[in-house]
Image (cartoon, helix red, strand yellow):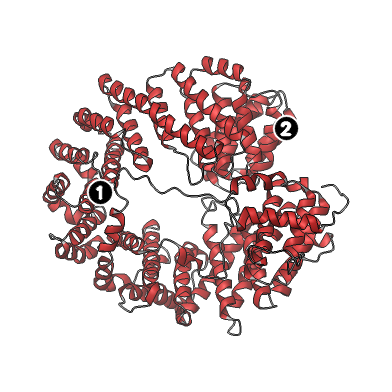
Amino acid sequence: MNSEEIYRPTPNDVVNVLRLLHDNGVSVQNSKKAYAELQQYQANPSFCILLSYVFGAEACPIQELQLSGSWIQYRRLAGITLKNNLEKSKYSLGLVAVKEAARCTLSVLGNPSDVRIARVAAQIIVKITALTSFGWWQECGMGNLSHLLLNELFEAGDLRTLSALYTLQYLMEDLPKEVGAASKDIIERVVTLVLDQNTKTNLQKAAFRMCFNIYEQAEQLDWNVEGLSPLQTGLTAASGTFAGVCTVLLEQGCGGDVPLLIQVLRSCAIMLEYLDYFTPMPDAEMTKLIDWWIRRTIDLVSSRVDVGEYNLQLKTAAMDLLTAALKLYDRMGGNGPISFLMEPIPLMLPDLVQALVTCVPMSIEEMNGILANDDYRLRDATAVNYHLNEASKDISEDTFMDDDCGAATLRASALRCIDALCVFSSKETFPHLIEQIKILWGADRQLKEASIVLFGTIANGCYTEIELTVPDIIRQLIDTVMSLSEDIFVVSVAIWSLSRILEWAFICDEKILSDIVAAFVSRMQSTSKRVQQAAVSALNTAFVTGHNMGATARLVETFPYLSESIIACLPIYCDGNLSLLCDLALHLIAVAEDLNITSRIGAAFKSNRIERIKYFEASYVALYINGVPNTHVDKDIFSIDRFVAGFLTRFPDSETSLKILGVWHAALKDAAERDIREDEDLLCNMMLTCCNFLGVTSTAALTEWSRQTQGSLASLGFQFLVTLPKQTVKSAAVTLLHRLLKFIGKSAYPNGIGEKLLVALTSSIRAIDDSYDKLDLVRLITLMVEMYFSEFPQIASVAFAAAVDALRSDAYNDSRWLFLTNGIRYMSHP
């Protein structure tokens, strides 16, 4: 970053930036145009200083200006915009602008007027630290950041303490490598607030939530390695302390605070994964753990005490904790400290099973809510993306209560717990469950649906116990599915339950399997989206099961009428159900030997594609060219093209594949020119669809196409990789660049990109934590090393070393081969 003259905000500039903030957040009447205007100033250092000035002002600097919202709203928008600019523009802002942002934000952090402002200030502090370093703050004369957070602000109370907690959480989330083993000290320091009786309740809860959030996020880290990272080392070292805090809070009843109790139960479920790190423990402590984590949790599930609006969430959290313990027991083979925690369960089974079963039947309100959106002609709800978005979790309030944690979630948790109980001890669990199933089975649709879903749930864990009665039950379920007068809820779970015993059906006489598949197919053309989804999902399961058992031939006699049903459903399916239908069609053409069947399906998809691409184009133009509000891009074409690419894998046609590749190349180019960033799903689908068609086109045809387009597709992939912040988009770009190099060779890349890409990959791989993203980067780097070593030996050597350093070979099944083969190639270079 270079130094420059410091800019001084003028009243006129302040008015202009407030107008811009108004148009981008206070009013959203023309948000697309306003956002485009905002983007123009993204890398402008003066704009950054102006935003810092507004964010740091306790009151509007222009007193006579009439605002359309509160000043806090404008300050918050200024802070979020500043944070986004720091994230996207990075070093181009210059040292002076970044220092001014740091100075103003540090002042706000030390004296926040509102919790929302404190939160944004914490995010800015973390972005600046990511841009510079922890030591930079002291080097610039702004003090020791760690000391400020863990001592001065932490002990100051009220909003200052909350500011420290926010910042510490975001630092651990965004800069795990920099925080490293210090995570132990941070966790142990923060929990002192939770246990300090003199701390205000809101700060106690905030401190606990912060620790929970950190451990929850750590679940996404790669733990399947011999050595832990510094962050993981710190978290494991502090796990006993945090687990102990959970136990203390449970003993205290969380002071009657039900939301806190829910959070503690969810924390216990996470901390079970750390059990080996904080055991063995004294007998008295283990007794407490068994009592409060398991026995009292079963009591919560079985209890009929009404805790008001938190009933569903509390029982869900309790069930999920029990399920986590049961699954860990199964995963560990019944060995280790988890075996002690299981002691109360067999003795408490009768009450536990009855309580779980009580949560299974759906209410009339739930059923009516599902029916309101169940017609196949209604499109699925589409998520709306906002460019001003704060993704980090708030620790200042019980935000988890905003999650979709209703009766459907409680039912799912109950069924998961029942399934885990059956695996844990089928012999003891089955008698209690079968009695409940018999009680529920009847004419009433709610109870009948519940009994059938219970049967499907226990089908795997209690297979030995139900083996003799399976044939009779299957006949009843088939009759239920085939009955046109049967309720859609009963039909859908009957289909699901049948799919749970397909392994048994494959080894029985052919008529049973044939009748089950025929029942599934009969419901594919239902007008109910719920039944459609159940039928097609079950048929996909049948193909996967048959493949795994080497028995796909058992399905051959169903192919003629199955293919006709797929063709009939193709014009009317959409959204998720269409994607499932395409999966089914791909399963079928992969094994069908009858060319009449495959050609009819291929022709149907080719015809349907003409209509689907029109829907895509019309919606794309409406949204991104004409700016029509309240519209979304119709993405069904991506499901169709996924099938088409699969079809061309078996029946290659380079002319067709090149034509479709050209369409998506042009669409991707248009998206880049229009700077479409917010719809990452659209960008990923475009790039991955290009990947699919690259893989089904001949090398000769691709080489000529790449020559004609002058490597434009690779340039677009490189552009998305280095300019867009979303990791999902970056990963899709990496996959695209890898496929281009793999199928075409160096000629796929325009001159100059190879060297720049190697440098960019070397820089970015160090910041990647996700296992799969890391592996994708390594694949691209090693292929590029092979292709470009002779041209850029120094850069290629550094890139390969970065790949070796970033990916630990014991973390993946195929990484040993990857390093072995590419390592030999690398070492073979002179």
Asked whether 43 or 198 is in front, the reply is 43
Asked whether 301 or 17 is in front, the reply is 17
Q: Residues within 10 Å of mark 1 (few under 14, many from 20)?
A: many
- Report the side of 721 relative to 365 (left or right): right
Considering only vertical position in the picture, is 774 above or below 226? above
Q: Residue at x 69, y 26 (%)?
A: 789
Q: Residue furthest bottom?
A: 198
Find residue 684 and report its horizontal and vertical position in percent: 52, 38
Q: Residues within 10 Å of mark 2 (few under 14, many from 20)?
A: some
The secondary structure type at the circle numbered 1 is helix
Residue 272 shows in this picture: no
- Using the rendered view, name the quadrant where residue 596 is placed: top left
Find residue 631 and report its horizontal and vertical position in percent: 48, 43
Considering only vertical position in the picture, is 428 above or below 579? below
Find residue 554 and report its horizontal and vertical position in percent: 21, 32
The secondary structure type at the circle numbered 2 is helix
- Using the rendered view, name the quadrant where residue 141 is placed: bottom right
Residue 393 shows in this picture: yes
Q: Residue furthest right?
A: 5
Q: According to the image, label 2 marks what residue?
A: 795
Considering only vertical position in the picture, is 683 above or below 603? below
Q: Residue at x 45, y 81 (%)?
A: 256
Give the quadrant of the C terminus: top right
Q: According to the image, label 1 marks what residue?
A: 496
Q: Of callouts 1 and 2, which one flags the residue occurring earlier in the amino acid sequence?
A: 1
What is the spatial separation of the Cα atoms under label 1 and label 2, in whole angstroms?
A: 54 Å
Q: Amino acid at mark 2?
A: Ile
Q: Amino acid at mark 1?
A: Trp
Q: Residue at x 61, y 77 (%)?
A: 192
